[in-house]
Amino acid sequence: MDLPPVGLGTMGIDDPDAVATALAAGYRHLDTARIYENEAVVGEGLAAGLDRAAGAADRDLDREDVTVATKLWIDDLAADTVAPAARESADRLGVDALDLLYVHRPRGDYDPEATLPALDRLVDEGSVRNLGVSNFEIADLDRAIEVIGRPPAAHQTELHPLFFRPDLLDHAREHGYPVVAYSPLAGGRVREVEPVVEAAEAHGTAPEAVAIAWAAAKEPVVTIPKASTEDHLRANLAAADLELTDAEVAAIDAVDREEELFPA
């Protein structure tokens, strides 16, 4: 699955205009989840962004240009609940089909032998275009591949300079799927990471831009930082074009701190 280097993470966003502004700025990947309780907000922002583009003289945005992703929470993962839960999410988002639907965590009602085939039927029916997983360990990923007979369309996981899992990236490379890095700014803590700050000073940019560039430089990683103001939205989008030196990347890789913001 092809995803842009920087998408919009929407956890905590409660204003549709932030989503519409992101689309106008060039974002083409919107990520939400049922547990965020803002799918309707994202849907309103998507509709507003498409309406604005339709009225522009140089229209350059259609629905099919935007990947709309959401996630089923752990109590939506029984075989008989995934389909109605997915329909509810699509309705709230105002879309005919979900471009990317994730298992949010392999917990609760998740049973790979029951959950994954039920989700795969939604792909066959066309109500879901791509099936992804989130917060999986290697064993979970291997079992999912065994059950559905192919790699996930994407694996979303926490990744930032304070929590870096090379083993998950190696697995993604081996099986050919993207890693979608959430919380790439570590909740703002990247400003406390010395190699990140030093690289930011060297490039005349913000530590947040360095953190995004560091993640985006790692095949096959894409990022979904949260932002709500136009300045921050544009800054995050531009960060993917920042080229760090090999030495800067290595210094950030070597940060010896494991601070997971959202442990299982």
Image (cartoon, rainbow, N blue to C red):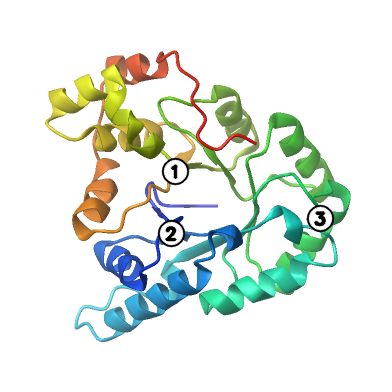
Q: Are marks 2 and 1 in contact (CB under 8 Å)?
A: yes
Quarter of the figure that contains the C terminus? top right
| Most distant residue in the bottom direction | 55
The mark found on residue 81 in the picture is none
| Residue 180 in view (yes/no) | yes
Q: Residue at x 54, y 43 (%)?
A: 178
Q: CA distance from mark 2 to mark 1?
A: 10 Å
- Residue picked out by circle 1: 222
Which of the 4 image quadrants contains residue 214?
Answer: top left
User: Which badge, 1 or 3, is on the more N-terminal residue?
Assistant: 3
Percent coordinates x, y for residue 124 in the rendering? 75, 68
Secondary structure type for disc 2: strand
Mark 3: which amino acid? Answer: Thr
Percent coordinates x, y for residue 180 in the rendering? 50, 44
Q: Residue at x 60, y 74 (%)?
A: 90
Mark 2: which amino acid? Answer: His
Percent coordinates x, y for residue 74 in the rendering? 72, 53
- Residue picked out by circle 3: 115
Secondary structure type for disc 1: strand
* Number of marks drawn: 3
| Most distant residue in the left direction | 204
Mark 1: which amino acid? Answer: Val
- Residue picked out by circle 2: 29
Q: CA distance from mark 3 to mark 2?
A: 25 Å
- Within 10 Å of disc 1 (Cα), the crowding (few <14, some 14-19, many 20+) is many
Mark nearest the camera among 1 and 3 is 3
Q: CA distance from mark 1 to mark 3?
A: 26 Å
- In the displayed structure, does residue 213 sit left or right of residue 141? left
| Residue 127 in view (yes/no) | no
Q: Residue at x 34, y 31 (%)?
A: 189
Q: Are marks 3 and 2 in contact (CB under 8 Å)?
A: no
| Most distant residue in the right direction | 113
